[in-house]
Amino acid sequence: MIDLTKKALPNTITVAGKAYSIYTDYRLWLRFMIDVEDKKTGFDVSYLFKNDMPPQISINTLMKFASPRNELPRKVEHSDEILLDFRLDSDLIYSAFMGQYGIDLLEVNEMHWHKFLALLSGITNGTKLADVMGYRSYNKNHKGDPYEKMKKAWKIEKTIIDNQEEAEEFESLFI
């Protein structure tokens, strides 16, 4: 969430009380988010740090920057549906930014990750991205319902770490 009372967006991550300078360009953080979504093993996160990298870094610390907490909208009901996949939906994201904001994500020199997320959350109806996310979030279940068919067509399958050992191994990659 962008704090408009501050003049600048965050550009550090704090680990054990020490601030580490990071790169904030959306391309690097998209790469990180895709690696996390793909549950890659042993991937390097040093490309996120400008100078020194903390000797130990957890996925949770990086995710606090990558997915800043927004108080709204509140979740009324819990859903396990994945509405957006940065890799699979990259064409739709590009098209939405170009169409709605006139921003060519391939040509823009640099954009802070938090600015990118704010603009992404503001994508309005009328873009294919909004349509697809709507299909994925649709929750009526009437037989033959065209929206239910579109939801199934656009659904992102979730990769599940099904045992504690695999989950701990994944988390250890960031320490």
Image (cartoon, rainbow, N blue to C red):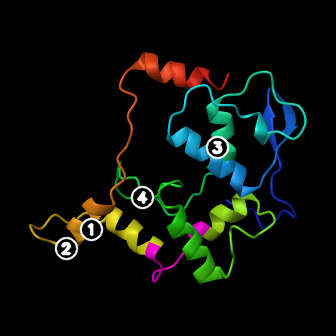
Could you tell me which secondary element the residue under label 4 belongs to? loop
> Between residues 61 and 167, which one lies in front from this camera angle?
167
Label pair 2/4, CB-CB below 8 angstroms: no
Magenta residue span: 120-128
Q: Which residue is mark 3?
A: 32
Could you tell me which secondary element the residue under label 2 belongs to? helix
Label pair 2/1, CB-CB below 8 angstroms: yes
Quadrant for residue 44, please give it.
top right
Neighbours of disc 4 within 10 Å: few (<14), some (14-19), many (20+): some
Q: Residue at point 10% right, 70% down?
A: 144
Label pair 4/3, CB-CB below 8 angstroms: no
Q: Position of residue 154 (x, y in %)?
A: 33, 61
Disc number placed over residue 150 in the picture, else none: 1
Q: Which residue is mark 4?
A: 83
Q: What is the C-alpha distance between the residues marked 1 and 3?
A: 29 Å
Q: What is the C-alpha distance between the residues marked 3 and 2?
A: 35 Å
